[in-house]
Structure formats: C-alpha cells, structure tokens
Image (spheres, rainbow, N blue to C red):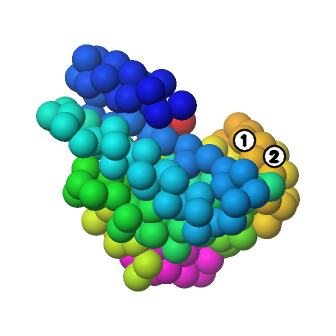
C-alpha cells in the first residue's frame, strides 16, 4: 500500500494539484497508537525525498470499527509524528464530524467544534472542508453521506458553516 500511495502522490504532483486528501485508515486491531505510528511513518516515507509542493491532507473519519482519525487528537498526533509535517494539513468532512459526535448541526455546537479543533490541531492547518450531509443520526459512528440539506445535519447548519468567519479562507468542496 505504501508503493500505491507514493504512486498516487506522484500522480497528484503530475496533475499540478495542491492537495492529496488521505483517509487515514484503520489500526487493524493493533490499537490506535500503533495505527497512528503506522500512518505517520507511511506519510513520512512518501514525503521523504519528494520535491513536490503537494500537501497531504488528513481527512477525519466517522469513527466506525477500528478506524482512526475520528477525534481531533488522533489527527494532531499523526501530523505531529510526520517528519516534514509542514507538508501535512487537515481536511474536515462534515458528515464524518457529525457521525463522530461533533455537534456541528447547532450554532453552539459548531462554535465548540471549531474551538476544539483550533486548540487541539490549529485552524491554520485546516486546508479544506468536504461538505456532506449525513444519512444517519448524530454520533452514529457510521459513514453515510447524503445530499446537502436532506440529511440529519440540515440546511441551516450548512448555512452557518459556509458563512462562518473563522472558515472564510478555507475552500469547500461537494
């Protein structure tokens, strides 16, 4: 998988893309600390010797099964462990946040979530937001994207997210 990831990084470079969004995967029963170390090592080895300006973005997860990356602490730990971490940022997926128990569907919950992210990871490392509604209820730990405004997060929450002043410089993708 490391060889394939390096090939993907090279393709991203050849395309002239700014970012490569990465789902961090699973600890496969070895525990979160071991999973974090394995992901950080793979990213370090991918970046080692590569002169590409492409930044790797770690995308948060919904937290199902043996996945890692559902908590901001995990994303921060992976980033800290990468040699060359200045080339690693974060992509937040709204459906994943919601499923992992971050209450972004309410005004106060969005404020609390952004404050926690800033404290734990740092908003300066947030480079992209993947907008998805959720087909499943809050804190379900299940990854089921749905159409904006038709899921459990709701249209008014997306209005608050895309107009939030702390996110004004962050690009959004659907």
Residues shaded magenta: 108-118
- Taking the spot 58% from the left edge, 68% from the top edge, the residue there is 33
Please give the count of numbered marks on the rendered protein.
Answer: 2
Residue 20 % position (x, y): 39, 36
Secondary-structure class at tag 1 = strand
- Taking the spot 52% from the left edge, 74% from the top edge, the residue there is 73
Q: Main secondary structure of the magenta part?
A: helix
- Compared across the picture, whether 126 is left or right of 1 comes to left
- Taking the spot 75% from the left edge, 57% from the top edge, the residue there is 29
- The image quadrant that residue 5 belongs to is top left
The answer to whether residue 112 is magenta is yes
Q: How much space separates mark 1 and mark 2, taking CA atoms? A: 6 Å
Of the numbered discs 1 and 2, the one sitting upstream in the chain is: 2
Q: Which mark is residue 37?
A: none
Assign the N terminus to one quadrant of the image. top right
Residue 84 % position (x, y): 24, 55
- Taking the spot 62% from the left edge, 47% from the top edge, the residue there is 25
- Circle 1 packing at 10 Å, graded few (<14), some (14-19), many (20+), is some
Q: Which residue is mark 1?
A: 145
Residue 100 in sight: yes
- Circle 2 packing at 10 Å, graded few (<14), some (14-19), many (20+), is some
Residue 40 % position (x, y): 43, 55
Q: Which residue is mark 2?
A: 135
- Compared across the picture, whether 83 is left or right of 149 comes to left
């Amino acid at each position: 998988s490391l060889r394939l990831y390096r090939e993907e990084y090279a393709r991203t470079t050849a395309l002239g893309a700014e970012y490569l969004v990465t789902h961090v995967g699973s600890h496969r029963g070895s525990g979160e600390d071991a999973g974090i170390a394995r992901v950080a090592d793979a990213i370090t080895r991918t970046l080692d010797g590569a002169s590409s300006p492409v930044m790797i973005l770690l995308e948060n997860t919904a937290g199902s099964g043996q996945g890692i990356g559902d908590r901001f602490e995990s994303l921060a730990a992976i980033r800290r462990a990468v040699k060359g971490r200045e080339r690693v940022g974060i992509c937040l997926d709204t459906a994943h946040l919601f499923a992992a128990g971050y209450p972004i569907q309410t005004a106060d919950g969005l404020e609390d979530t952004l404050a926690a992210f800033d404290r734990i990871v740092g908003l300066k490392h947030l480079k992209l937001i993947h907008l998805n509604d959720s087909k499943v209820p809050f804190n379900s730990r299940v990854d089921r994207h749905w159409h904006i405004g038709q899921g459990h997060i709701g249209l008014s929450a997306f209005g608050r997210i895309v107009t939030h002043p702390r996110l004004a410089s962050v690009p959004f993708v659907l």
